[in-house]
Amino acid sequence: MIERPNDWNESPAIIGGARTLPAGNYKCKIVNVEKSTSKNGNDMLKIFFDIDDGDYAGIYMDRYLNNKKSNEEAKYPNAGVYYQLLGEGQTGRLKGLVQCLEMSNPAFKWNWNEQAMNGCVFAGQFREEEYFNQNGERRTSTRLVYIHPLEELANLDVLPAKQASKAGAPQSSADAERQLESIFGGPAASPDQIPF
Protein backbone atom coordinates (compact mmCIF):
# COMPACT_ATOMS: atom_id res chain seq x y z
CA MET A 1 0.00 0.00 0.00
CA ILE A 2 1.36 3.46 -0.90
CA GLU A 3 1.56 6.29 1.60
CA ARG A 4 -0.84 9.22 1.19
CA PRO A 5 1.05 12.49 0.45
CA ASN A 6 0.58 15.30 2.96
CA ASP A 7 -0.59 17.71 0.24
CA TRP A 8 -3.23 15.35 -1.25
CA ASN A 9 -6.21 17.60 -0.48
CA GLU A 10 -4.53 20.83 -1.67
CA SER A 11 -3.01 19.51 -4.92
CA PRO A 12 -4.97 20.04 -8.15
CA ALA A 13 -5.56 16.95 -10.26
CA ILE A 14 -3.61 16.90 -13.54
CA ILE A 15 -5.42 14.94 -16.22
CA GLY A 16 -4.10 14.24 -19.72
CA GLY A 17 -1.17 15.80 -21.53
CA ALA A 18 -0.56 19.25 -22.89
CA ARG A 19 -2.22 20.34 -26.12
CA THR A 20 0.20 20.50 -29.02
CA LEU A 21 0.07 23.32 -31.55
CA PRO A 22 0.21 21.98 -35.12
CA ALA A 23 2.23 23.75 -37.79
CA GLY A 24 0.22 26.50 -39.48
CA ASN A 25 -0.59 30.18 -39.35
CA TYR A 26 -2.24 31.80 -36.34
CA LYS A 27 -3.40 35.14 -35.00
CA CYS A 28 -1.09 35.84 -32.05
CA LYS A 29 -1.09 38.39 -29.25
CA ILE A 30 1.89 39.75 -27.32
CA VAL A 31 1.41 39.20 -23.57
CA ASN A 32 4.73 40.57 -22.31
CA VAL A 33 8.04 42.01 -23.59
CA GLU A 34 11.36 42.03 -21.77
CA LYS A 35 14.69 43.56 -22.77
CA SER A 36 17.31 40.90 -22.19
CA THR A 37 20.78 39.71 -23.19
CA SER A 38 21.51 36.71 -25.42
CA LYS A 39 23.99 33.97 -24.48
CA ASN A 40 26.52 35.75 -26.71
CA GLY A 41 26.06 39.02 -24.82
CA ASN A 42 23.91 40.79 -27.43
CA ASP A 43 20.92 42.92 -26.48
CA MET A 44 17.58 41.40 -27.46
CA LEU A 45 13.86 41.53 -26.84
CA LYS A 46 12.09 38.50 -25.44
CA ILE A 47 8.56 38.75 -26.82
CA PHE A 48 6.12 36.51 -24.96
CA PHE A 49 3.04 35.75 -27.05
CA ASP A 50 0.03 33.47 -27.18
CA ILE A 51 -2.38 32.23 -29.80
CA ASP A 52 -5.26 34.70 -29.81
CA ASP A 53 -7.96 32.97 -31.86
CA GLY A 54 -9.39 29.58 -32.75
CA ASP A 55 -9.07 26.13 -31.20
CA TYR A 56 -5.61 26.84 -29.79
CA ALA A 57 -6.32 30.25 -28.25
CA GLY A 58 -4.48 30.61 -24.94
CA ILE A 59 -2.40 27.43 -25.38
CA TYR A 60 0.83 28.87 -23.94
CA MET A 61 -0.75 30.80 -21.06
CA ASP A 62 -2.81 27.71 -20.13
CA ARG A 63 0.35 25.59 -20.12
CA TYR A 64 2.16 28.18 -18.00
CA LEU A 65 -0.65 28.49 -15.45
CA ASN A 66 -1.00 24.69 -15.20
CA ASN A 67 2.75 24.34 -14.63
CA LYS A 68 2.61 27.05 -11.92
CA LYS A 69 0.13 24.93 -9.96
CA SER A 70 2.77 22.29 -9.30
CA ASN A 71 5.94 24.38 -9.66
CA GLU A 72 6.06 27.93 -8.33
CA GLU A 73 9.29 28.49 -10.32
CA ALA A 74 7.68 27.52 -13.66
CA LYS A 75 8.51 29.75 -16.62
CA TYR A 76 6.46 30.71 -19.64
CA PRO A 77 6.80 27.99 -22.32
CA ASN A 78 9.78 28.62 -24.59
CA ALA A 79 7.60 27.85 -27.63
CA GLY A 80 5.65 31.02 -26.73
CA VAL A 81 8.69 33.30 -26.81
CA TYR A 82 10.05 35.11 -29.88
CA TYR A 83 13.62 36.41 -29.62
CA GLN A 84 14.44 39.61 -31.50
CA LEU A 85 18.11 40.60 -31.50
CA LEU A 86 18.90 44.32 -31.29
CA GLY A 87 21.80 46.41 -32.49
CA GLU A 88 23.89 46.73 -35.62
CA GLY A 89 23.08 44.12 -38.23
CA GLN A 90 19.62 43.47 -36.76
CA THR A 91 17.99 46.80 -37.59
CA GLY A 92 16.14 45.50 -40.65
CA ARG A 93 14.51 42.67 -38.69
CA LEU A 94 13.51 44.97 -35.83
CA LYS A 95 12.11 47.48 -38.32
CA GLY A 96 10.14 44.70 -40.03
CA LEU A 97 8.71 43.58 -36.68
CA VAL A 98 7.69 47.15 -35.81
CA GLN A 99 6.05 47.66 -39.22
CA CYS A 100 4.09 44.40 -38.89
CA LEU A 101 2.83 45.50 -35.47
CA GLU A 102 1.91 48.99 -36.72
CA MET A 103 0.03 47.53 -39.71
CA SER A 104 -1.82 45.05 -37.47
CA ASN A 105 -2.64 47.44 -34.62
CA PRO A 106 -3.94 50.87 -35.72
CA ALA A 107 -3.49 52.38 -32.24
CA PHE A 108 0.13 51.20 -31.96
CA LYS A 109 2.89 53.66 -32.88
CA TRP A 110 6.51 52.69 -32.18
CA ASN A 111 8.07 55.03 -29.61
CA TRP A 112 11.16 52.99 -28.57
CA ASN A 113 9.38 51.70 -25.47
CA GLU A 114 9.15 47.93 -25.85
CA GLN A 115 6.32 47.79 -23.30
CA ALA A 116 4.08 49.50 -25.86
CA MET A 117 4.10 46.17 -27.77
CA ASN A 118 2.05 44.49 -25.02
CA GLY A 119 -1.39 43.60 -26.33
CA CYS A 120 -0.41 43.93 -30.01
CA VAL A 121 -1.60 41.23 -32.40
CA PHE A 122 0.15 39.81 -35.47
CA ALA A 123 0.03 36.89 -37.89
CA GLY A 124 2.43 34.14 -36.85
CA GLN A 125 3.83 31.56 -39.26
CA PHE A 126 4.71 28.36 -37.36
CA ARG A 127 6.51 25.23 -38.48
CA GLU A 128 7.30 21.88 -36.95
CA GLU A 129 10.98 21.49 -36.14
CA GLU A 130 12.84 18.33 -35.23
CA TYR A 131 15.55 18.34 -32.57
CA PHE A 132 17.49 15.88 -30.44
CA ASN A 133 16.99 16.01 -26.69
CA GLN A 134 19.75 15.53 -24.10
CA ASN A 135 19.35 11.75 -24.40
CA GLY A 136 19.85 11.85 -28.16
CA GLU A 137 16.17 11.10 -28.85
CA ARG A 138 14.52 12.74 -31.86
CA ARG A 139 11.66 15.05 -30.83
CA THR A 140 9.54 17.74 -32.50
CA SER A 141 8.20 21.11 -31.47
CA THR A 142 6.21 23.80 -33.23
CA ARG A 143 7.98 27.15 -33.38
CA LEU A 144 7.11 30.68 -34.48
CA VAL A 145 9.37 31.37 -37.46
CA TYR A 146 8.00 34.56 -39.05
CA ILE A 147 5.86 37.49 -37.95
CA HIS A 148 3.58 39.07 -40.59
CA PRO A 149 0.92 41.78 -40.67
CA LEU A 150 -2.40 40.35 -39.54
CA GLU A 151 -4.03 41.14 -42.90
CA GLU A 152 -1.77 38.52 -44.54
CA LEU A 153 -2.88 35.65 -42.26
CA ALA A 154 -5.32 34.03 -44.71
CA ASN A 155 -2.77 34.06 -47.56
CA LEU A 156 0.27 32.62 -45.77
CA ASP A 157 1.58 29.22 -46.84
CA VAL A 158 2.09 26.51 -44.23
CA LEU A 159 5.83 26.09 -43.84
CA PRO A 160 7.37 22.64 -44.40
CA ALA A 161 8.86 20.85 -41.39
CA LYS A 162 12.51 21.46 -40.57
CA GLN A 163 14.38 18.17 -40.31
CA ALA A 164 17.10 17.77 -37.69
CA SER A 165 20.45 16.18 -38.22
CA LYS A 166 22.05 14.15 -35.48
CA ALA A 167 23.42 16.71 -33.06
CA GLY A 168 27.05 17.41 -33.82
CA ALA A 169 27.19 15.03 -36.78
CA PRO A 170 28.64 16.57 -39.95
CA GLN A 171 26.25 16.49 -42.91
CA SER A 172 28.86 16.88 -45.67
CA SER A 173 32.61 16.66 -46.15
CA ALA A 174 32.79 20.47 -45.89
CA ASP A 175 30.94 20.31 -42.55
CA ALA A 176 33.32 17.58 -41.36
CA GLU A 177 36.35 19.68 -42.35
CA ARG A 178 34.96 22.75 -40.53
CA GLN A 179 34.28 20.61 -37.47
CA LEU A 180 37.86 19.32 -37.47
CA GLU A 181 39.21 22.84 -37.96
CA SER A 182 37.26 24.02 -34.93
CA ILE A 183 38.59 21.13 -32.83
CA PHE A 184 42.24 21.42 -33.90
CA GLY A 185 42.41 25.17 -34.43
CA GLY A 186 43.12 25.28 -38.14
CA PRO A 187 42.69 23.59 -41.51
CA ALA A 188 43.63 19.96 -41.95
CA ALA A 189 47.15 19.35 -43.22
CA SER A 190 47.62 17.88 -46.67
CA PRO A 191 49.16 14.36 -46.77
CA ASP A 192 52.58 15.68 -47.89
CA GLN A 193 52.70 17.96 -44.81
CA ILE A 194 52.33 15.11 -42.32
CA PRO A 195 55.78 14.52 -40.77
CA PHE A 196 55.61 10.70 -40.56
Image (spheres, helix red, strand yellow):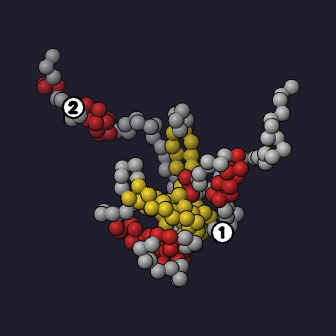
* Placement of the C terminus among the 4 image quadrants: top left
**Residue drawn at x 53%, y 77% as measured from the top left:** 104
> Mark 2 or mark 1, which is nearer to you?
1
Q: In the rendering, at what x and y percent does residue 129 appear?
A: 52, 49
> What amino acid is found at the position of numbered circle 2 in the picture?
Ala
Q: Earlier in the sequence, mark 2 or mark 1?
A: 1
The disc placed on residue 53 is 1
Contact between marks 2 and 1 (CB within 8 A): the answer is no
Horizontal side of residue 166 vs 71, given as left or right: left
- Viewer-nearest residue: 173 or 27: 27
Note whether residue 153 is visible. Answer: no
Q: Look at 61% across and 48% down and name the residue there.
A: 73
Looking at this view, is 140 or 97 the one in front?
Answer: 97
Residue located at (36% from left, 55% from top): 42
Residue with the mark numbered 2: 188
In the picture, residue 7 is in which quadrant?
A: top right
**Looking at the image, is 10 positioned above or below residue 26?**
above
Crowd class of label 1 (few under 14; some 14 to 19; many from 20; radius 10 Å):
few
